[in-house]
């Protein structure tokens, strides 16, 4: 096996999977204790573990252990990067992953796809659909604007809509 190559079989040899965590089956070095939870949380909020001389994100290792392949991108369904339960992980395109992203910190309305229009003095709903910014209306009521935004996300983004 190539030093940087990881396989499903190799992962099953060195790890047990329990409730979203990887547990060491064997001591791969003197710092590793058999039975201990593998990994550390990086600055981006993901758990990482060194395997075959290279750092890997735990959710990618878990996905490979269960499905036998590694997609380009894996989405955490609930948006929690530390929830690596296999039921919370799914293959996604970059676009689908973005549609399931958390609310941005600079969002002033508190709702996804809802913005204040200074010109109209109303709440507006718009979003990128098939590469184009699409306007879904102006509303006096913030909650109504959010409801329209939710319906729009469900219609265009399906199960990836947050």
Image (cartoon, rainbow, N blue to C red):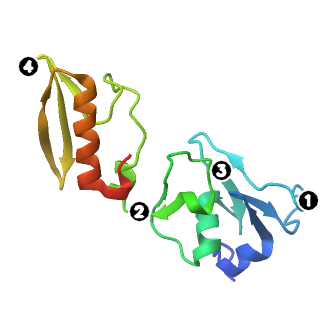
Q: Residue at x 24, y 54 (%)?
A: 156
Q: Earlier in the sequence, mark 3 or mark 2?
A: 3
Q: Residues within 10 Å of mark 1 (few under 14, many from 20)?
A: few
Q: Residue at x 60, y 39 (%)?
A: 43
Element assignment for label 2:
loop
Q: Which residue is mark 1?
A: 30
Front residue of 44/18: it is 18
The quadrant of the picture occupied by the N terminus is bottom right
Q: Nearer the viewer, mark 1 or mark 4?
A: 4
Q: Nearer the viewer, mark 3 or mark 2?
A: 2
Q: Are marks 3 and 4 in contact (CB under 8 Å)?
A: no
- In percent of width and height, residue 71 lies at 47, 70
- In percent of width and height, residue 60 lies at 58, 63
Element assignment for label 3:
strand
Q: Is residue 49 visible?
A: yes
Element assignment for label 4:
loop
Q: Earlier in the sequence, mark 2 or mark 1?
A: 1
Q: CA distance from mark 3 to mark 4?
A: 45 Å
Q: CA distance from mark 2 to mark 1?
A: 37 Å
Q: Which mark is residue 92?
A: 2
In which quarter of the view is residue 59 placed? Answer: bottom right
């Amino acid at each position: 096996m190539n030093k940087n190559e990881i396989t499903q079989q190799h992962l099953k040899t060195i790890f047990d999977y329990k409730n979203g965590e990887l547990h060491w089956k064997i001591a791969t070095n003197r710092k590793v204790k058999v039975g201990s939870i593998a990994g550390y949380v990086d600055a981006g909020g993901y758990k990482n573990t060194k395997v075959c001389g290279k750092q890997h994100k735990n959710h990618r290792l878990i996905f490979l252990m269960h499905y036998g392949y590694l997609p380009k991108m894996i989405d955490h369904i609930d948006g929690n990067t530390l929830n690596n339960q296999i039921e919370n992980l799914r293959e996604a395109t970059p676009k689908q992953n973005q549609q399931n992203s958390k609310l941005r910190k600079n969002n002033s309305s508190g709702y996804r796809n809802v913005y204040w229009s200074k010109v109209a003095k109303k709440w507006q709903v718009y979003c990128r659909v098939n590469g184009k910014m699409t306007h879904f209306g102006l509303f006096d009521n913030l909650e109504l604007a959010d409801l329209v935004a939710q319906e729009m996300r469900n219609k265009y983004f399906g199960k990836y809509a947050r």
